[in-house]
Image (tube, rainbow, N blue to C red):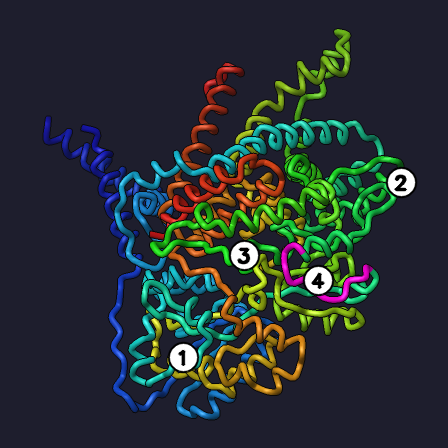
Amino acid sequence: MTAIRAAHAAPPIRTKVRRNLTTLSFLAPALIGIVVFFVYPLISAVYFSLTKFDLLSVPQWVGLDNYKRMADDPFLLQSVRNTLWMVVVFVPVRIVGAIGLSMLLTKLRRGVGFFRTIFYLPALVPPVAATIAFVYLLKPGTGPVNTFLEKIGIDGPLWFNSPAWAKPSLVLLGLWAIGDLMVIFLAAVLGVPESLYEAASLDGANAWHQFRSITLPSIRPVILFAAVTGVIYTLQYFDQAAVAGSIASGQATTGAGISQSFGYPEGSTFTYPLWLYTVGFRYNALGYANALAVALFLVAFIVTLILLRRAKAFSGEES
Amino acid sequence: MNKRIPHALFALGTAVLLTTACTPAPKETKIADPGASVSGTVELWHFFTEREANAIDQVVKDFEASHPNIKVTVKSGQDDSKVTQAIGAGNGPDIGLSYSTDIVGKFCSSGAWVDLTPYITRDKVDLNQLNATTRSYTEYGGKRCAMPFLADAYGMYYNKDMFAKAGIAGPPKTLDELTEDAKKLTVKNPDGSLKTVGFLPLYDFYENAAAHLAPATGAKWLTDDGKSAVGTDPNWKTLLTWQKNLVDWYGYDNLNKFRSSLGDEFSADNAFQKGQVAINIDAEYRLAFLKDQSPNLKYGVAPIPTVDPARYGGGYVTGNIMGISKNAKNPEAAWELIKYLTTNDAAVTKLAGLIKNVPTTQKSIADPTLNADADFKTFIDIFNNPNSMTTPPSASGPAYQETFGKFLTDYQAGKVKDLNSGLADADKQINSVMTLGG
């Protein structure tokens, strides 16, 4: 009986192994990509964060020294403050703006395609080009925006040249290029069953009630997606801040020298990734730069987990 | 025990081993005997583009003509980051040409660029033919890993028409005279805003970096043991107090508003070239911009004003540097090319004339053709002046300058109430940041 059972049992194991190998072979390209481009760099970053490394000589093991150093790093504190400001303001403003714009576009009766294209187009402009254009548009004194404001009797702000206005100017730039997010919300809003609105209308719900009770709950997964990707994007905010500081300071240059104008004016646009870049590629302190990168990864990971858990608790869904 | 843990540990160990295996290891280099024949291909990476890259090509051709056994491959537009990454990855060029002396400390201490002393000794190259300041910024910790490839000397440009209109006879020679002239040259609009500015003293404006102004008082960056000296050298306090008084006279907000309306430094809209600023700190390379973009501007050049008249005549000096990568494939040919480009008087003179930078050997400095241009000669004189200063190499590169720069922008904005304690804090911050380099 046992022999018969064993004889019956053998083929399924071989089949299972074969099936697993087949599955693995199909997954292999993706798995290799994940290992080579994600797992290996991540483990390398963790390893280098525990060393003193300048890219030019052999790394020296320093344990947790690079992490301890963060506690006394004044520029880290400044960059964290600026990055947090961006996360708290930039992400919600972009989400609210994208939802508002997508709602407006769903209400349009004529020229829908035209307006969708117009509002989406800025998202196709490379960030560096868009930032340069914005700095010149908002240039105090000679820029068209302040020239127009002056004509209507308003003394325009210094925009990218003012420590108080530099970050809001970056938010404005982000709002202008909102098309990528708008498209996603537009698809979500259009996906809400029309019958729900009709039923609500019959019950006497006005537009605000319909938005709050039907649209918002229906697009909640998309809001969550926008929040998570928005936070991760903003934690890595680099290009626009670097270019805006360089151009607005009047010292546009290339190569490593660009870091001299990082944070202009008065450190107001000095974000966490700018400090990470400076440490790593300007001062060649790759060990500390990797520690900063690992810390950024952990923060992004934890924030994502919190957002997902809160969203789950809020919606009562399990996934 | 969870079976996945050993697997994960194995994967982690493998990754760490792979990571460490991919990091560069030191390599010993032996040099050839004196008189040995040198041949083969040598690769030169430099940062120049367009007109300046053409100048390099011309002089490299001269080198190939005089060294028929050596072929040079030139790659232009390569900045320090690319060179660093290439050396780190084991694929560094034979020769790197950098625009920044800031990398000398790191490249010398890490061995990324090899020590040139054995070659210099073997070939009996007399380093005294090089200007003393350039010698100082091409070595670090007693190790000479670089040679100077032309230099920049910083001085003062002034607008002659604006000076004449304000009734000022000549350029200021002391900081007090500079303040006085700056006030006379400043014109305000009816609403009180600034129309033209005599001297725009903000540290983050164009070339007003602290390094370029430090020779005005002789302020030193580092102590002999390599620590920050900004809190202990009284010359910094003198310079900062003078600058802040002038900023306060204009009003920081007024200056910031005025500055924000000015054009980019490296464009035809440069504020000095457009007559919006009467006095500007800049280097000899501005002469080429003025000739090209503002041929009708009447300007003069002079050394920067100093607090002590005895210091007058000097300025800030820096330059380009060259070195041999530790993983150079043909270091002997690389040294031949470096020797030619940095110590051959005819080659250095030709390069200086084509690129419009200051030459670095004693004979090329005295070249009558280069000195025929009175404005260019002013910069050669600044370069030669014993009061001229440079920024000392550091293993953390420009970290000490940029950290101080952040303090200075806070100070001029009025965010630092007590200068003494502010400078003491800056000392601590600089010393902390400098430990990043070792």
Residue corresponding to mark 4: B267
Question: What amino acid does circle 2 point to?
Answer: Lys
Image point 58% across, 50% down: which residue? A261
Closer to viewer: mark 3 or mark 2: 3
Question: What amino acid does circle 1 point to?
Answer: Asn
Compared to residue A251, the image places residue A186 above or below, namely above
Badge 2, how many Cα within 10 Å: few under 14, some, many 20+? Answer: few
Asked whether A238 or B138 is in front, the reply is B138
Compared to residue A312, the image places residue A99 above or below, namely below
Residue corresponding to mark 3: B217
Asked whether A309 or B252 is in front, the reply is B252
Tell me whether the residue at label 3 lies in contact with that at label 2, contact meaning CB atoms closer than 8 angstroms. Answer: no
Q: SS at mark 3? A: loop
Residue corresponding to mark 2: A151
Residue corresponding to mark 1: B128
Image point 56% across, 25% down: which residue? A221
Q: Where is residue A207 in the image (x, y as percent from the top left)?
A: 76, 16
Cα distance between the residues tagged 4 and 3: 30 Å
Q: Is the magenta stretch mostly helix, strand or loop?
A: loop
Instruction: Give the image quarter of residue B248.
Output: top right
